[in-house]
């Protein structure tokens, strides 16, 4: 510092430190800000209550109609309920910025956008995983779900990767929500479409052809198939192809989500397209 | 660091057009020329005021300077950095505060709002605590920082906005109506705080609709109307534009538009403004003639009851009114 030049500004972190702090510390703070169902009084009925009843409903319906065994329904639904977080939660972490009118403030910061974006996914993934684990516990406690204990680590891995991939899809809805009003309508639609088409309760091959085509392009489908095989004792190696496809689908949606986020950011500067600026 | 003597904020012929559409079935597209060739330069340590009526283009101008909007044409630089090409570098050097009570994370505490933005601005972790504490003290929120923002009053939100804008101790600060919704005592404290920013060597651009605030705070002012700068200078220089005028204030109970039109046509009258009070209207009539014009003015109200009438020296507000009314 030379005499006469007042150097102003608080000391800043290196860009790498800042990247990781925005990713982890920032990600958690902003998740608390934007995830609507964080308080226990809302979290328990929505994030745990509704998956509980969903699993009980379909497993009992399956038992009654004799379509499949309990394991089929427990695994399918326990994996799918992660989208309570991976779809709804992910949508909230972006779309709610618009609701609170904080987008302008956010976009006026120099923060690394990838860190901003990815940081929001980590709590969503953790929460989705928690809901799925809860789903499996429900299956073991209230239904006669059973699987070899030795398969648990492999199943945990597959469920985690499926939650990650499903979050990629949810973030895409979130990005759309930055621009579009009422995106939660689309989240509802996505949740139930996935319940219908991803082989959660209806075997894929008994769906009409066009639905089968859609199901192959959605997250969850391949993850659920892999999880079922693992629960019935197959090796991780034998489901590697399914896992790869699931991840590829999730990554594609994830990249698309980030590209949309950046596109909406750029176009907001050009067309003043964000509601509140 | 900028070249010595080079302006810290520089707007050169800035223009911004908004394209909007109306109607839902038969969509008609509309173009609004919000900013039409605005130029000014703000020197280091200066407190520069941007005044103008609603819709004049002040916020649009600021949004271009803080990188949130790309100018339709023209250029702008902050600390020598181009606001379009070097947007990220500009962002890390500036702070900005928009008036209003939105734009905060309602479910988080005031403290967590600040912590999040401290991260986004890359403020060093060990520096954050000190800096946040200092700012909470400065804006008078110490002791309330752990409460959720959803329970904050308008004024508290406004204070939090200000603290948020200063977290990274930016050398350049943009304040868009920062005292809106703040009580008189609070607004006074806030003005002292704004004045202290330039004492710290910061460069400040301020918009406000309160003329006394602009008069008290600003080193220089640009008056903007319909997207164009109509005058620029120190508050003193702007006042001298109307120094030779007299202002006659007339309280009238129920004045009609015709009377006002007639007033405008009285010889010597240069501007008339109307302020609605509870049961009466306060008319401010500027004229070059002096107090002797008063009888001629009073003759224009057919029968309306007239209250207090005073002639006085012009203020910055009168200069402002004459500027934004003058060429309408
Ligand atoms: N996003 C937008 N889309 C379309 N028109 C806009 C948009 N934002 C502002 N405008 C228009 O641009 C013009 C200037 O608006 P601006 O907000 O810059 O005014 P201002 O001087 O800040 O006014 P105020 O004192 O009321 O805050 C207005 O006519 C406004 O309606
Ligand atoms: Mg404005």
Image (cartoon, rainbow, N blue to C red):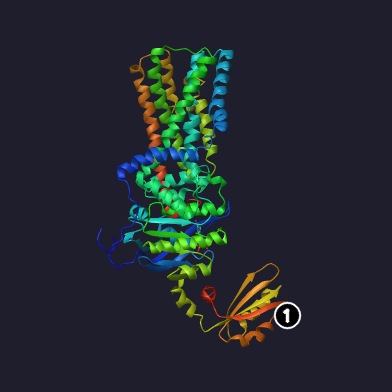
Q: Is mark 1 within 8 Å of ligand 1?
A: no
Graded by Cα atoms within 10 Å as few (under 14), some (14 to 19) or many (20 or more), the crowding at tag 1 reads few
- In the picture, measured across the screen, residue B276 lies left or right of residue B106, that is right
Q: Chain of mark 1?
A: B
Give B19 or B205, whichever is nearer the viewer: B205
Q: Quadrant of residue B79?
A: bottom left
Q: Residue at coordinates 47% horizontally, 12% vertically from top-left?
A: A146
Q: Quadrant of residue B196?
A: bottom left
Q: Residue at coordinates 49% horizontally, 49% vertically from top-left?
A: B142
Q: Residue at coordinates 44% horizontally, 64% vertically from top-left?
A: B195
Residue B149 sits above or below residue B204 on the image: above
Residue A146 sits above or below residue A186 on the image: above
Q: Please state the horizontal and vertical placement of residue A179, each as a whole percent of the image.
A: 48, 46
Give A238 or B244, whichever is nearer the viewer: B244
View extreme (left): residue: A2
Q: Please state the horizontal and vertical placement of residue B147, each as a whole percent of the image.
A: 53, 44
Q: Residue at coordinates 35% horizontally, 15% vertically from top-left?
A: A235
Residue at the disc numbered 1: B302
- In the picture, measured across the screen, residue B35 lies left or right of residue B82, that is right
Q: Quadrant of residue A224?
A: top left
Indicate the quadrant containing the N terminus of chain B: top left, top right, bottom left or bottom right: bottom left
Q: Please state the horizontal and vertical placement of residue B231, each as a whole percent of the image.
A: 45, 74
SS category of the residue bearing label 1? loop
View extreme (right): residue: B303
Q: Is residue B122 visible?
A: no
């Amino acid at each position: 510092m030379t005499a006469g030049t007042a150097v102003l500004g608080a000391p800043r972190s290196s860009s790498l430190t800042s990247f990781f702090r925005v990713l982890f510390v920032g990600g958690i703070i902003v998740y608390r800000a934007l995830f609507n169902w964080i308080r226990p009084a809302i979290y328990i009925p929505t994030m745990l209550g509704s998956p509980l009843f969903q699993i009980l409903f379909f497993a009992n319906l399956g038992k009654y109609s004799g379509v499949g065994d309990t394991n089929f329904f427990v695994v399918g639904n326990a994996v799918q309920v992660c989208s309570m977080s991976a779809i709804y939660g992910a949508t909230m972490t972006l779309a709610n910025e618009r609701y609170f009118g904080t987008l302008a403030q956010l976009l006026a910061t120099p923060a690394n956008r990838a860190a901003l974006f990815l940081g929001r996914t980590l709590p969503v993934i953790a929460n989705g995983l928690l809901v799925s684990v809860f789903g499996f516990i429900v299956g073991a406690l209230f239904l006669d779900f059973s699987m070899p204990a030795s398969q648990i680590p492999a199943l945990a891995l597959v469920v985690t990767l499926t939650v990650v991939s499903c979050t990629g899809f949810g973030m895409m809805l979130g990005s759309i929500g930055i621009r579009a009003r009422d995106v939660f309508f689309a989240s509802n639609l996505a949740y139930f479409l996935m319940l219908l088409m991803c082989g959660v309760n209806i075997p894929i091959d008994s769906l009409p052809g066009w639905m089968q085509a859609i199901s192959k392009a959605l997250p969850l489908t391949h993850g659920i198939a892999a999880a079922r095989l693992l629960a019935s004792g197959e090796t991780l190696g034998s489901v590697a192809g399914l896992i790869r496809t699931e991840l590829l689908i999730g990554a594609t949606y994830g990249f698309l989500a980030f590209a949309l986020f950046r596109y909406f950011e750029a176009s907001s500067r050009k067309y003043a397209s964000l509601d509140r600026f | 660091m900028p070249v010595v003597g080079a302006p810290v904020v520089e707007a050169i012929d800035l223009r911004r057009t908004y394209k909007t559409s109306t109607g839902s079935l038969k969509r008609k597209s509309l173009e609004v020329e919000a900013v039409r060739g605005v130029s000014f330069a703000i020197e280091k340590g200066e407190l520069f005021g941007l005044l103008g009526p609603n819709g004049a283009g002040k916020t649009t101008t600021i949004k271009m300077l803080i990188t949130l909007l790309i100018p339709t044409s023209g250029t702008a630089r902050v600390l020598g950095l181009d606001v379009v090409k070097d947007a990220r570098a500009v962002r890390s050097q500036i702070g900005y505060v928009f008036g209003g009570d939105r734009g905060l994370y309602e479910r988080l505490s005031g403290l967590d709002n600040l912590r999040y933005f401290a991260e986004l601005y890359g403020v060093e972790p060990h520096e954050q605590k000190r800096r946040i504490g200092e700012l909470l003290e400065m804006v008078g929120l110490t002791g309330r920082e752990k409460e959720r923002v959803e329970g904050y009053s308008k004024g508290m939100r406004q204070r939090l906005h200000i603290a948020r804008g200063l977290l990274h101790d930016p050398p350049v600060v943009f304040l868009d109506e920062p005292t809106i919704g703040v009580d008189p005592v609070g607004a006074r404290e806030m003005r002292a705080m704004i004045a202290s920013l330039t004492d710290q060597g910061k460069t400040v651009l301020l918009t406000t609709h309160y003329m006394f605030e602009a008069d008290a705070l600003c080193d220089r002012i640009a008056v903007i109307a319909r997207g164009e700068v109509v005058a620029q200078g120190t508050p003193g220089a702007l006042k001298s534009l109307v120094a030779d005028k007299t202002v006659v204030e007339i309280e009238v109970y129920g004045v009609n538009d015709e009377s006002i039109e007639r007033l405008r046509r009285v010889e010597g009258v240069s501007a008339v403004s109307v302020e609605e009070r509870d049961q009466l209207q306060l008319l401010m009539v500027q004229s070059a003639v002096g107090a002797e014009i008063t009888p001629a003015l009073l003759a224009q109200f057919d029968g309306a009851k007239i209250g207090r009438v005073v002639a006085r020296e012009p203020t910055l507000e009168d200069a402002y009114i004459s500027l934004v009314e003058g060429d309408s």
